[in-house]
Amino acid sequence: MNYRRSRVPGATYFFTVNLADRQRTWLVDHIDLLRQAFSSVKQRHPFTLDAIVILPDHLHALWTLPPKDRDFATRWMLIKGHFSRGLPDFDTRGRSRRRKGERGIWQRRYWEHLIRDEDDFARHVDYIHYNPVKHGHVRCASAWAWSSIHRYQHRGLIPCDWGSQADSDDGQYGERLQDRP
């Protein structure tokens, strides 16, 4: 497969990044380390973190890169590396990962989507903020601690009761009804 990433300078992107072992809960167990990784990389390679949610085994983020900058790949490499180096030692790596010097914390690839317009941006923000409800971690999106929803609510962009499980039947959180099981 000849996969190509979209690289538009100054654009906004949606990302999904997963742990290699989806049974682990390292992202929330080591949330301060993850925050340090983001902060460290943002200082050296600035970007705007428009929205984010951290779940136990994966995260979703919406970033806007600076004008003339299209290098999100380096930023993810540095964030993942910083986080991985800060975790306690363990060795569940396969031969391929050991040979490449990888710790095996993260899936090698990640999902990226170029945001096309304001509607696309809004749908992805909703998807990010509703994700803890979708995965059954909470009944209301604002009950999840590791989400930018609190920043959006503080600014008055989202009502405090937005994203309750009772609202989930109308497909308004970034998924069409036909896409749901």
Image (cartoon, rainbow, N blue to C red):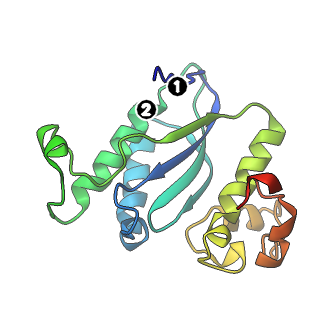
Residue at x-position 34% and y-position 51%? 106
Relative image position of residue 103 (x, y in whole percent): 21, 51
Tell me: residue 83, above or below residue 10.
below
Q: Quadrant of residue 8?
A: top right
Look at label 2 and name its amino acid. Answer: Ala
Q: Quadrant of the C terminus?
A: bottom right
Front tag of 1 and 2: 1
In the rendered structure, the answer to whether residue 95 lies left or right of residue 72 reads left
Q: Quadrant of residue 164?
A: bottom right
Q: Secondary structure at mark 1?
A: loop
Tell me: residue 106, above or below residue 13.
below
- Which residue is identified by label 2? 73
Relative image position of residue 124 (x, y in whole percent): 71, 48
Residue at x-position 34% and y-position 41%? 78
- Which residue is identified by label 1? 5
Relative image position of residue 121 (x, y in whole percent): 75, 42
Look at label 1 and name its amino acid. Answer: Arg
Asked if the residue at tag 2 contacts the one at tag 1, i.e. Cβ–Cβ closer than 8 Å, the answer is yes
Q: Secondary structure at mark 2?
A: helix
